[in-house]
Amino acid sequence: MSISLNKGGSFNLTKEAPALKKIMFGLGWEMKPDQPLDLDASVFLLGANLKLPQDLFFVFYNNLKSPDGAVQHTGDNRTGFGEGDDEMILCNLDLIDNRITEIIVCVTIHEAISRRHNFGLLQSAYARLYDVENKKEILNYDLDASNSSDAGMIFGKLRKEANEWKFYAVGEGNGGAGLQGYVDNFG
């Protein structure tokens, strides 16, 4: 059964799905008519200091795999056309480097500043967490209009607490800073 989370909501993955090992972060969107827009999903694998242990722990369209092999981006979708997830990031929780305590999942708009794009130009945008092995959606998060002026958003984070993985729906925008703002913050 899928849970629909709102901003600030949380879900204990380890307690609710103890056998869960392989997950997928899915991102989907449709554009308002005549508004071509490219959303990008990115993951920052952070240590206890909330920084990347190495640059290669930033997984996005130009670095498709983390050095531990635990996280893999399936590739960039530049249009959002079609049914289902437009971008996907796969994660094997058992393979995550021991230094990693938090996984930040971001959604940004490519070239948002130069093109004057923001989330207000989207409709039916969502991010979700999916159990790969059981082929079931675990939770779904609407990328709602409350961030309509933003070009980047942390949609959620996985945090390891006392050997349990918990998911937090953050839904926090970063204004017009886009992807570079997150790179500056976590790098």
Image (cartoon, rainbow, N blue to C red):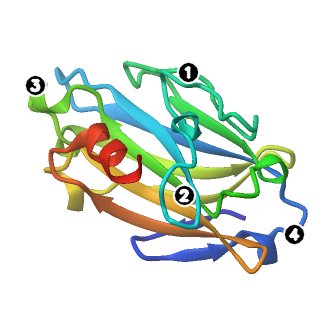
State which tag comes first along the sequence, 1 or 3: 1
Name the kind of residue labelled 2 in the image: Asn
Q: Which marked residue is nearer to the observer: mark 3 or mark 4? A: 3
State which tag comes first along the sequence, 3 or 4: 4
Give the left or right position of residue 59, taking residue 71 as reference.
Answer: left
The foreground one among 123 and 44 is 44
**Marks 1 and 2, how far apart in space?**
21 Å
State which tag comes first along the sequence, 2 or 3: 3
User: What residue would you read off at disc 2?
Assistant: 140
Image point (80%, 78%), residue name: 15
Name the kind of residue labelled 3 in the image: Ser
State which tag comes first along the sequence, 2 or 4: 4
Give me the disc on residue 93. Answer: none
Q: Which marked residue is nearer to the observer: mark 2 or mark 3? A: 3
Q: Which marked residue is nearer to the observer: mark 2 or mark 4? A: 4
Kindly check if marks 1 and 3 are in contact, taking CB atoms under 8 A apart as contact: no
Find numbered disc 1 in the image and state the secondary structure of the residue it sits on. loop
- x and y percentages locating residue 72 in the rendered image: 66, 32
Image point (73%, 69%), residue name: 13
**Marks 1 and 3, how far apart in space?**
23 Å
User: What residue would you read off at disc 1?
Assistant: 75
Give me the disc on residue 114. Answer: 3
User: What residue would you read off at disc 4?
Assistant: 18
Q: Is residue 120 above or below residue 144?
A: above
Give the left or right position of residue 105, taking residue 33 as reference.
Answer: right
Find numbered disc 3 in the image and state the secondary structure of the residue it sits on. helix
Give the left or right position of residue 78, taking residue 83 as reference.
Answer: left
Kindly check if marks 1 and 4 are in contact, taking CB atoms under 8 A apart as contact: no
Image point (79%, 44%), residue name: 132
Name the kind of residue labelled 4 in the image: Pro
- x and y percentages locating residue 182 in the rendered image: 34, 47
Dot 3 alpha-carbon crowd within 10 angstroms: few under 14, some 14 to 19, many 20 or more: few
